[in-house]
């Protein structure tokens, strides 16, 4: 029998991830989808799948000599909260979310990478932890490492201000179809966020930044643009694989304590604000 406050899995591991201390290293990449955990590990050696339960799949291995793990969080804030808390119990200290996003600005097109420095909190989960005035923000070292990784790899990327929403359809201003529910406020969602110079919409990062920060963890994210909302276009354009690789490289930079003075990290306010190094 286990206690109701901190239930245990049948293998005596943390309940949802089904992992025990020592199973994963301190550096963990967080895809949303379980199959993306496998994609991330494609470039690793000695890959082992440790657990797979509901949306949570964990693989470990080595990237360029560094021990890494990838654990999928599932979609949205609630499953992200579960994942981050249980990883923290296991001693994890640094996490990078790898996900997809919808751009609402001409700065970012399909296949570009966005590194959110902060998020508008419409995730619905982080308010269980702290009031709405509390910020959701990335760890500076993780942002620097991600930017340096993108520079090194020659990927198009930029820093962004994301809006994390606990809804994919109405909450992100997507009509439900002919005659479907379409309240007047939904029409204003994207134009109002654009006025506030928000760059993109997605579903997990704010909850992860807040919960991770409150657990004393270093958090960051790299999101590939799969939707261009102003142009109504959808497609991966190689972005998912680039985001996976950028996250692995960034972890390596962080492990080696090599975050840069060399990368110029201004929050680029111009309409041309994507750094192109290809
Ligand atoms: N994920 C989201 O939440 N929204 C998008 O438009 C694309 C990916």
Image: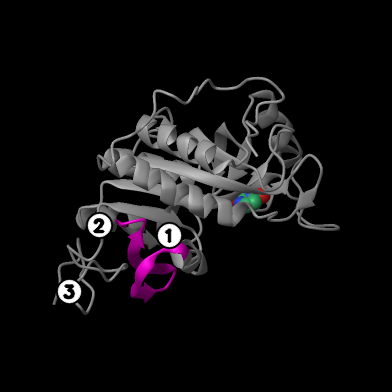
Picture disc at residue 36: none
Extreme-right residue of the structure: 178
Q: In which quarter of the image is residue 162?
A: top right
The answer to whether residue 28 is left or right of residue 267 is left
Q: Quadrant of residue 199?
A: top right
Q: Where is residue 72 in the image (x, y as percent from the top left)?
A: 43, 62
CA–CA distance between discs 3 and 1?
A: 20 Å
Q: Is residue 273 above or below residue 6?
A: above
Comparing labels 2 and 3, the label whose residue is closer to the camera: 2
Residue 46 lies in the magenta stretch? yes
Q: Where is residue 242 in the image (x, y as percent from the top left)?
A: 57, 51
Q: Which of 153 and 111 is in front in this view?
A: 153
Q: Position of residue 204 (x, y in %)?
A: 49, 49
Which residue is disc 3 drawn over?
A: 12
Are there few (<14), some (14-19), or many (20+) residues within 10 Å of tag 1?
A: many
Picture disc at residue 25: 2
Which residue is disc 1 drawn over?
A: 73
Residue 47 lies in the magenta stretch? yes
Q: In this view, does 15 lie above or below 101?
A: below
Tell me where the magenta segment starts and ends, as one range.
Answer: 43-66
């Amino acid at each position: 029998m286990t206690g109701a406050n901190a239930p245990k899995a049948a293998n005596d591991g943390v309940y949802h991830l089904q992992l025990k201390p020592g199973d994963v290293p301190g550096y963990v990449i967080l895809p949303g989808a379980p199959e993306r955990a496998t994609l991330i590990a494609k470039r690793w050696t000695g890959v082992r799948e440790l657990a797979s339960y509901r949306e949570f799949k964990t693989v470990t291995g080595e990237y360029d000599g560094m021990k890494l793990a990838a654990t999928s969080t599932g979609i949205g804030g609630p499953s992200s909260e579960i994942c981050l808390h249980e990883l923290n119990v296991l001693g994890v200290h640094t996490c990078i979310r790898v996900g997809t996003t919808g751009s609402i600005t001409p700065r970012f097109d399909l296949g570009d990478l966005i590194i959110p420095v902060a998020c508008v909190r419409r995730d619905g989960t982080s308010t269980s932890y702290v009031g709405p005035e509390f910020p959701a923000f990335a760890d500076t070292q993780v942002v620097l490492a991600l930017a340096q990784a993108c520079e090194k790899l020659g990927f198009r990327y930029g820093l962004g201000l994301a809006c994390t929403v606990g809804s994919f359809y109405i909450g992100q201003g997507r009509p439900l179809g002919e005659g479907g529910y379409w309240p007047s406020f939904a029409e204003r969602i994207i134009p109002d966020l654009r006025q506030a110079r928000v760059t993109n919409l997605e579903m997990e990062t704010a909850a992860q930044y807040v919960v991770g920060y409150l657990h004393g963890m270093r958090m960051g994210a790299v999101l590939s643009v799969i939707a261009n909302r102003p142009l109504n276009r959808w497609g991966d354009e190689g972005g998912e694989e680039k985001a996976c690789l950028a996250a692995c490289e960034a972890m390596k930079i962080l492990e080696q304590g090599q975050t840069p003075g060399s990368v110029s990290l201004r929050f680029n306010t111009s309409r041309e604000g994507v750094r192109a190094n290809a």
